[in-house]
Structure formats: C-alpha cells, structure tokens
Image (cartoon, rainbow, N blue to C red):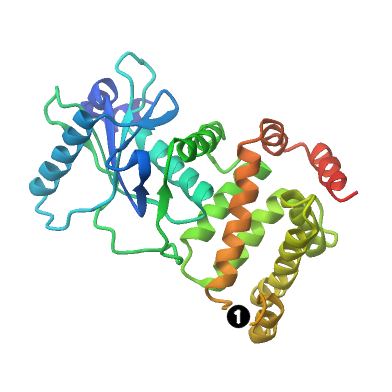
C-alpha cells in the first residue's frame, strides 16, 4: 500500500477533480431532437434524463468552442449537447462517472430507437475552478463509424424521452462488468452493444445471436430452435403473423451464424429468398442485420422497462428463468 501511495504522489489533481467536478459535457452524434424538443439539449441529473434550459446550453457550446481552440482542433463535432450533473453536495462522487452515464444513455437511445447514437465529445469541468477542464477520455475527432446502419436516432416528443429515461434508469442499475458478475440481462446488453459497434458483418450477426442466447437459452439442448421459438413468442405471443416472421428470420439466421462459426459456406442468396417479403429484394448485408438489430433491441427494451422481467433476467436464477421461458410457448 505504501508503494502505491508513493506512485501517486504529485497527482493531487485527481482528488481535486473528485471534489470540484460538478458537470460533465457530452456531444451525441447521430442524435436529433424534433417537435417540442427541437433546439433543446438534454441533461442527466439525479439518475434521470431531462431537458436542458437555454442558458446552460449556451454555456455548454461555449465550453466546446474554447476547448477545441485550446487544443488546436479544427474539426468541431456536431450533435446534441448532453450535460451530466454530479451534484455539488455529494461526497461520494467520482470524477469520471459522467463517462459511464453518457455510455449508458447512448445505449438507452439505441435500444429505444433501434438506430445509431454515439457520444463523440466528453469532458468534466467546473467553471469556478482553474483549470476548468479536468477529464478528456479520448480523441474527440470521430472518424470511425462502427454502427453499420448509419441511421440517426430521433427523439420526437416527451413521450419518447420518457421511454428512453425508463431504459436508462434500468441500465444504470445493472452492475458494472468486472469480469466476475454476469447475469443474462447484463450479458445481453453488452453483446448487443458490441454487435452494433462491430464492422465485420458475420461477427456482428453472431454477436446478436449470442445476446439472444444470453436471455433465451439455459442449457445446450436445441439452442437454435429454443431461442428462435422463445424470442418470437416473447415479442408477439398474440400475433401469429409477426411471430412467424421473427421465428423464420432467427431460424434461417442461425444457419449463417453456424456457417461462420464453423467455417462452412452457406448459400446466402437462398436464405435471402426465404426471408424476402413479396417480390421485393432482400439484402443479407443490409436488411437482415437491421431486422436482427430491431428484434434484439425490442426484446431488451421490453425487459428493461418491465419491472418483473428486469428482476427475473437480472437475477441469474436459472430455474426461475427456465420456468418462465417454458411457459411462453405452452
């Protein structure tokens, strides 16, 4: 312990950060506010996502400009401004916690909209202190767009924002992955996030299926059939047409996943013919991963916004989960 203490001598500014950092600022790319929210910004405060007032919004934009000028960055990221309020009265605040909350908010928006959202600029600060800038976790020039679909997320009204807030509040209740604690829901959220960020299409598809397996498989028996059947009933227990569509996509998708994992060649054109709607073309590189993404997002959304399901899939109780999943298709 003494050696560790000596290693950090001269780094008192870390303690200063924890004491005085009262705001985090992020710019979210691919996120657009419309309707009654047009021209507004967002704020995370006391574990909730709300609307920014114009005064703070102007302050945030000014800080962005000054920071980029100081660092000689000619590129200015565009997007929706999001503030994070640490709360000056808190004694347990962590200087870098806004980074975690921004990450969880971007996940919540993706899950709610099935589209893209990414925090590309982030710093923590307190204007009353000098220096004003305390933390910059990465290079803010966003040249690497991993989310293949390239679709913006839209928040059109306060109802949309309430849904995002509900998802966000559940996400921040999940334990931070420390390499030891794993639950079906935590794994599904993380695999979904990795799938959305993955460039390699075959691996992207595989990660989506692993997310589904985290939730709908409790053993190694008939995994592809069980996952496809349970997921379809979970989403559309009373709509046979939609349920059949989900089952068909997942069962055929498993052929692609298995072919990729085991190094086997699959006839993608033949699979596309099975999945297309009517006479329209169906792209396995675009339509299929988009549909798969929407399905997994809708499933995770339902779990995160339903208290009983959240508790069940957060518990890791194999018997209770198996009993619930079996009851879906009876």
Q: Is residue 36 above or below residue 297?
A: above
* Above or below for 291 versus 10: below
- Name the residue: 83% across, 44% down: 322
Q: Secondary structure at mark 1?
A: loop
Residue 41 or 229: which is nearer the viewer?
41
Q: Is residue 31 above or below residue 168?
A: below
Q: Assess disc 1: are there few (<14), some (14-19) or many (≥20) residues with their C-alpha within 10 Å of its C-alpha.
A: few
Pinpoint residue 248: horizontal percent, then vertical percent: 75, 68
Judging depth in this view, the residue of 160 and 321 nearest the camera is 160
Q: Give the residue drawn at x 8%, y 48%.
A: 69
Asked where in the image residue 156 lies, by quadrant, the reply is top left
**What residue sits 36% from the left and 46% below the top?**
34
Q: Between residues 211 and 269, which one lies in front from this camera angle?
A: 269
The percent coordinates of residue 262 (x first, y second) are 69, 76
Q: Is residue 123 left or right of residue 149?
A: left
Q: Quadrant of the N terminus?
A: top left
Q: Position of residue 286 (x, y in %)?
A: 52, 73
State whether residue 10 appears in this view: no
User: Which residue was labeled with disc 1?
Assistant: 280
Residue at x-position 79% and y-position 41%: 321
Up the image or down, 272 lies above or below 237; here it is below
Q: Quadrant of residue 17?
A: top left
Image location of residue 224, percent across then percent down: 78, 64
Please state the total of marks drawn on the protein image: 1
> In this rendering, does residue 29 appear at all?
yes
190 left or right of 3? right
């Amino acid at each position: 312990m003494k050696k560790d203490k000596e290693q950090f001598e001269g780094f008192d500014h870390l303690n200063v950060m924890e004491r005085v950092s009262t705001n985090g600022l992020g710019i979210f790319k691919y996120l657009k506010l419309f309707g009654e929210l047009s021209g507004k910004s967002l704020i995370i405060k006391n574990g909730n996502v709300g609307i920014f007032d114009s005064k703070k919004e102007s302050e945030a934009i000014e800080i962005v400009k000054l920071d980029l000028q100081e660092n000689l960055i000619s590129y200015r990221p565009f997007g929706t401004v999001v503030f994070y309020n640490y709360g000056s009265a808190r004694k347990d605040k962590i200087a870098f916690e806004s980074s975690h909350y921004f990450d969880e908010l971007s996940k919540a928006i993706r899950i709610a909209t099935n589209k893209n959202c990414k925090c590309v600029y982030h710093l923590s600060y307190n204007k009353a202190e000098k220096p004003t800038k305390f933390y910059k976790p990465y290079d803010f020039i966003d040249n690497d767009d991993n989310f293949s679909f390239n679709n913006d997320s839209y928040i059109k009204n306060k109802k949309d924002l309430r849904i995002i807030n509900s998802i966000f509040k559940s996400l921040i209740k999940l334990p931070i992955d420390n390499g030891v604690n794993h639950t079906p829901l935590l794994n599904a959220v993380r695999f979904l996030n990795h799938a959305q960020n993955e460039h390699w299409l075959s691996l992207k598809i595989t990660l989506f299926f692993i997310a589904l397996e985290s939730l709908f498989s409790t053993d190694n028996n008939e995994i592809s059939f069980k996952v496809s059947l349970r997921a379809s009933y979970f989403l559309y227990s009373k709509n046979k047409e939609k349920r059949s569509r989900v089952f068909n996509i997942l069962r055929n998708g498993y052929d692609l996943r298995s072919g990729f994992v085991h190094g086997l060649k699959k006839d993608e054109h033949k699979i596309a013919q099975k999945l297309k709607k009517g006479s329209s073309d169906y792209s396995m590189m675009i339509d299929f991963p988009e549909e798969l993404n929407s399905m997994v997002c809708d499933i995770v959304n339902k779990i995160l916004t339903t208290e009983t399901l959240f508790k069940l899939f957060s518990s890791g109780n194999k018997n209770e989960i198996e009993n619930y999943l079996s009851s879906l298709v009876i």
